[in-house]
Amino acid sequence: MENEFYRDYKERVMPALQKQHGYKNVHQVPKVEKVVINTSVGSQSDVKQALEEAKMELALITGQQAIETRAKKSISNFKLRKDQAIGAKVTLRGERMYEFLERFIKAALPRIRDFRGVSPRCFDSHGNYTLGVSDQSIFPEVELDKIKRNIGFDVTIVTTARTNDEAKSLLGEMGMPFSDRARKPPALPTT
């Protein structure tokens, strides 16, 4: 059975993007390749317990088992040793990716307090979008009375778009609630 969010992408989003950007072939239309959810617990006093809780929360939210991430090098100021387990991540592709995106865009993001949209400036130069989430309680799967510690994580949406404008129009058509107010840099004082 095909995911409803994916069906909407094929039937509504692809033709809209093709018309908007003038693509001649459907294979030129950008799509979401994968979604990577990453968290770090490196600064916790009880790293092993915090890591297990983070892996369980990520598995609950995504429906897929998380893998540990390890420190690449030793940093004495942060009390890090090379190859020490400091975080967890999940990479979603295919049907699970579309299910997660649907829940994230339609259910989790609107549950953020004082939510006015996500920043349209979080694209890298290759059309990928990264968004930081400070609390796992925005997801409906997480039971609030069972939360022992807040776990923040990064959600990276990797697209096949060649530019940030293509990626923004792709995610916008898929329902990503971008804020209309782009933060402007502060004006320099005049002398």
Image (cartoon, grey):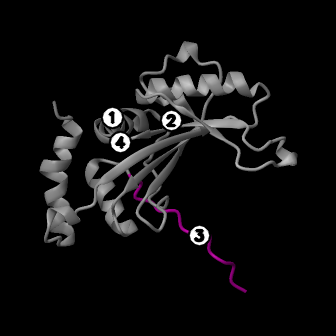
Residue 93, numbered circle: 4
Q: Rounded to the nearest whole Å, what is the CA distance between mark 3 and mark 2?
A: 25 Å
Q: Are marks 4 and 1 in contact (CB under 8 Å)?
A: yes
Q: Marks 1 and 3: which is nearer the front? A: 1
Q: Which residue is mark 3?
A: 185
**At x 80% / y 42%, what residue is drawn?**
80
Quadrant where the N terminus lies? Answer: top left
In magenta stretch: residue 29: no
Q: Is tag 4's residue or tag 3's residue first in the polypeptide sequence? A: 4
Question: Is residue 48 found left or right of 161 in the rendered image?
Answer: right
Amino acid type, mark 4: Arg
Q: Is tag 1's residue or tag 3's residue first in the polypeptide sequence? A: 1
Q: From what the image shows, is residue 126 above or below residue 152?
A: below
Most frequent secondary structure within the magenta stretch? loop
Q: Rounded to the nearest whole Å, what is the CA distance between mark 4 and mark 1?
A: 6 Å
Q: Which residues are magenta?
A: 178-191
Q: Quadrant of residue 81?
A: top right
Q: Could you tell me residue 13's position as x and y percent?
A: 19, 53
Q: Is tag 3's residue or tag 2's residue first in the polypeptide sequence? A: 2
Q: Could you tell me residue 113's position as x and y percent?
A: 50, 35
Mark 1, secondary structure of its residue:
helix
Q: Are marks 4 and 3 in contact (CB under 8 Å)?
A: no
**At x 43% / y 29%, what residue is drawn?**
64
Q: Which residue is mark 1?
A: 96
